[in-house]
Amino acid sequence: MLSKTLSIHRKQFPLILSYAITIHKCQVLSLDTAIMDLSTDVLGDGMAYVALSRVRTINGLHLLSLDALSVKVSSNPGINEINRLRTKFRMIYCKTRKVKERREGFK
């Protein structure tokens, strides 16, 4: 009989069961807690909004990193119209304020 000695060395690191999903997959979910990494510029228009709005409370939102330059805003015609109306309102408000100041100055 031959007797051989076999020595085995193994390395292991602890794993914790966790779940990961894409932004597309989480569109229909409301989450209590979410950990997000928004540091890459692979995000499409509105994807950061979808990701951030899935969490029920701000306390449940955990950002690993956020690159503001990677957040893309949709060029939605509705958004353009809202911005146009805001600008128009500011101009009307400024003109009305100047007229009011002039009238009060003549008293």
Image (spheres, helix red, strand yellow):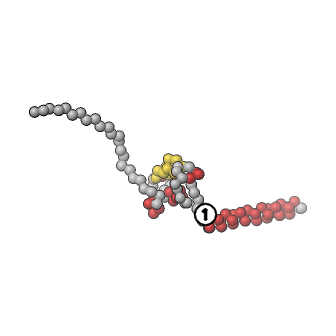
Label count reads 1
Q: Nearer the viewer, residue 96 or 6?
A: 6
What residue do we see at 50% from left, 57% from top? Answer: 51
Q: Nearer the viewer, residue 84 or 2?
A: 2
The percent position of residue 5, horizontal first and vertical second, equals 19, 32
Q: Amino acid at mark 1?
A: Ser
Is 28 on the left-hand or right-hand side of 87? Answer: left
Residue 1, position in %: x, y? 10, 33
- At horizontal 46% and vertical 53% (from top left) the residue drawn is 34
Where, by quadrant of the figure, is residue 72 drawn? bottom right
In this rendering, the answer to whether 56 lies above or below 65 is below
> Which residue is located at x 44 percent, y 60 percent?
25
Instruction: Please tell me whether mark 1 sits on a helix, a strand or a loop.
Output: loop
* Nearer to us in this view, 88 or 43: 43
Residue 81 position, x and y percent, is 65, 67
Pointer 1 local density, CA inside 10 Å: few below 14, some 14–19, many at least 20: few
**38 sits to left or right of 1:** right
Q: Residue furthest right?
A: 106
Q: Is residue 53 something one can see in this rendering?
A: no
Query: Which residue has dot 1 on it?
Result: 75
